[in-house]
Amino acid sequence: MDPASEVRWTHSIKSPWLVPILDVRPVTLTASSSSDSPEYASNAVSYGQEDGTCFVGQNPQVSSTIPAKLEYRRDRVLADGALFIPDCMEQKWALYFHKGTILCIRSWKREVYATASVDQSVDLIRVTSIRGTFLGEDEAPEFTIRVLDYLLRTHALGMIFPAPIPKEIGKDLKQAALWCMSAFGKMARYATSDEIKTRIPDQPLRTHSLLHIAAARGDREAADKQLRASVPVDLLGADGLAPLHWALASEDTKMLEFLLEQGSPVDVRSAEGATPLMNAVQQGRADHSLCLLRTGADVNATDHRGFSSLHRAAEMGKTDLVRILLQRGARPDIDAQGYTPISLAQKCGNDDIVRILDEGV
């Protein structure tokens, strides 16, 4: 069956956005993108290590500028870095924030299609103007604004939100779905030609900041530069993790030690309440775990679900880390959603860990 035959409109009465919604998932979640151009294919998957600085100073081909009024929450500061990095050919846009400007990159072409000027207040981020267009030179200003809002909500904030489509395209369901695939790829789940009355999203807009990226790369000089530029050492990134969490990607513990020296709390919490020690244990990083424990990490801290580092080690069969945590005073009796570390080890068939926890050694 042709997936496009499953594309359907939902009446506004049944729509959570109170406008007619086209469900384009049968096409966008099943279709694959391809290109006859080796350059485009390479470009589309080239963003893994990209921090966006190479796009700073590039101008959109369409030079017109329109006023805009879009608002989003912020968490302390929106730092320079990546708002969204595509990881496959079915994701059509990369988004970065640098020097007070949002950069919107057409991923296959690695070209800046639009830029947006941003003002920051105590708790809000305001887009005040947009230069360029997203999907055509003759794009209506209101459509350009809707596209940017859609990209920020879905790509940067991870929200489910309808993609804007031109009114004339919505008359042909197959054409509309294919248009969404071409314009937004698999990130488009729903679409509408109607303007949606929106409110400021609850979650704050965050980046994978240049400090986070430096921490993951173990680049002390770059990290120091960002700290001297007043980026908070414990700022949460777009994934809800702090730079100290990202420093676990470094092969050695030098970056962990550097960030701790610069004032990062050793038990800085992620958006889900996880400490760096919990993440280090989950990743099986014994050296990093010991470094954090030596600098005062709370061995019995629990995340928002109630799970501790010992829960993680027991569940994942990390025998050496179970011993380390117990020697540092980890409690084997902490209950989280009906599970203690020992019951998790039993559930996962980690018999050696069950024995260790039983013996308490």
Image (cartoon, grey):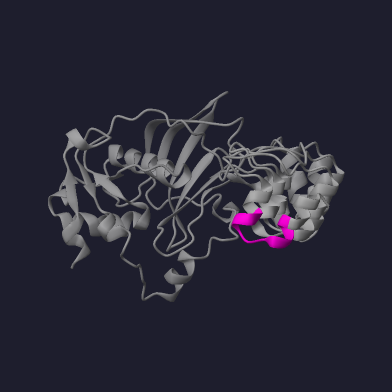
Q: Is residue 327 left or right of residue 13?
A: right
Point out residue 39 in the picture as x, y percentages from the top left corner: 45, 72
Point out residue 113 in the picture as x, y percentages from the top left corner: 41, 52
Tell me the quarter of the image containing the N terminus: bottom left
Against 163, residue 176 (above or below) is: below
Confirm whether the magenta stretch covers residue 353.
Answer: yes
Closest to the observer, 1 or 185: 1
Q: Which residues are magenta?
A: 345-354
Q: Is residue 23 left or right of residue 187?
A: left
Closest to the observer, 196 or 28: 28
Please name the predominant secondary structure of the magenta segment in the image. Answer: helix
Which of the 4 image quadrants contains residue 236?
top right
**Residue 205 shows up from this direction:** yes
Q: Is residue 38 left or right of residue 144?
A: right
Determine the residue positioned at 34% across, 43% down. Answer: 147
Closest to the observer, 189 or 294: 294
Confirm whether the magenta stretch covers residue 227.
Answer: no
Determine the residue positioned at 70% across, 53% down. Answer: 313
Determine the residue positioned at 72% across, 52% down. Answer: 280
Q: Disc count in the image? A: 0
Which of the 4 image quadrants contains residue 49?
bottom right
Point out residue 266 in the picture as x, y percentages from the top left corner: 77, 39
Query: Extreme left residue here?
Result: 171
Against 75, residue 94 (above or below) is: below
**Residue 214 shows up from this direction:** no
Determine the residue positioned at 23% across, 37% down. Answer: 15
Point out residue 135 in the picture as x, y percentages from the top left corner: 31, 52
Query: Extreme top residue here?
Result: 122
